[in-house]
Amino acid sequence: MGRMSDVERSGAELPEYAELVLEVAERIPPGRVMTYGDVAEWLGEGGPRQVGRVMALYGSAVPWWRVVRSDGVLLPGHELRALNHYREEGTPLREAAGASRGSMPRLDMRRARWDGATG
């Protein structure tokens, strides 16, 4: 994985499934995203909830903003941090409907979604 996670630094064993999920998250190119379900499908095991749980517990050591909800809504509680990463990486975004003041854009899933194969 390259970087040590908080779990690895503490000496605790990282569950095998968590290690696999984090490895996929690290492979997602800048400016692209995969949904929780995409990651589970790519691994061939688990589901969106299991991937979400791994990301919530261990994802801080990887580009967590690249593993997202399928509807393109930014991660609640982390919207501004994620939005900064998306803008830095040039991730395709869609402005909120009506572009009302203070509303968050969404990810443009059609353009941002990565299939796990192409660059």
Image: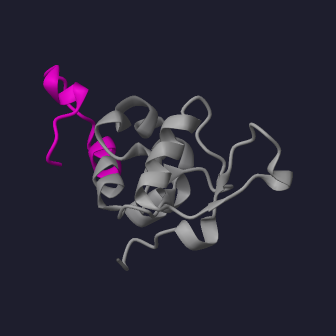
Q: Which residues are magenta?
A: 1-21
**Residue 60 sits above or below residue 33 on the image:** above
In the picture provided, is 14 more to the left or to the right than 88? left
The image quadrant of residue 60 is top left
Q: Give the residue at the far top of this rendering.
A: 10
**Residue 117 sits above or below residue 79 on the image:** below
Residue 17 is one of the magenta-drawn residues: yes
Residue 43 seen in render: yes
In the image, what residue occupies the spot 24% across and 34% down? 14
In the image, what residue occupies the spot 39% across and 71% down? 116
Residue 47 seen in render: no
In the image, what residue occupies the spot 14% across and 47% down? 2
In the image, what residue occupies the spot 55% across and 36% down? 80
- Residue 87, x across and y down, in percent: 49, 53
- Residue 5, x across and y down, in percent: 22, 33
Residue 50 is one of the magenta-drawn residues: no
The image quadrant of residue 10 is top left
Q: Nearer the viewer, residue 49 or 111?
A: 111
In the picture provided, is 113 more to the left or to the right than 108? left
- Residue 113, x across and y down, in percent: 53, 68
Quadrant where the C terminus sits is bottom left
- Residue 32, x across and y down, in percent: 45, 64
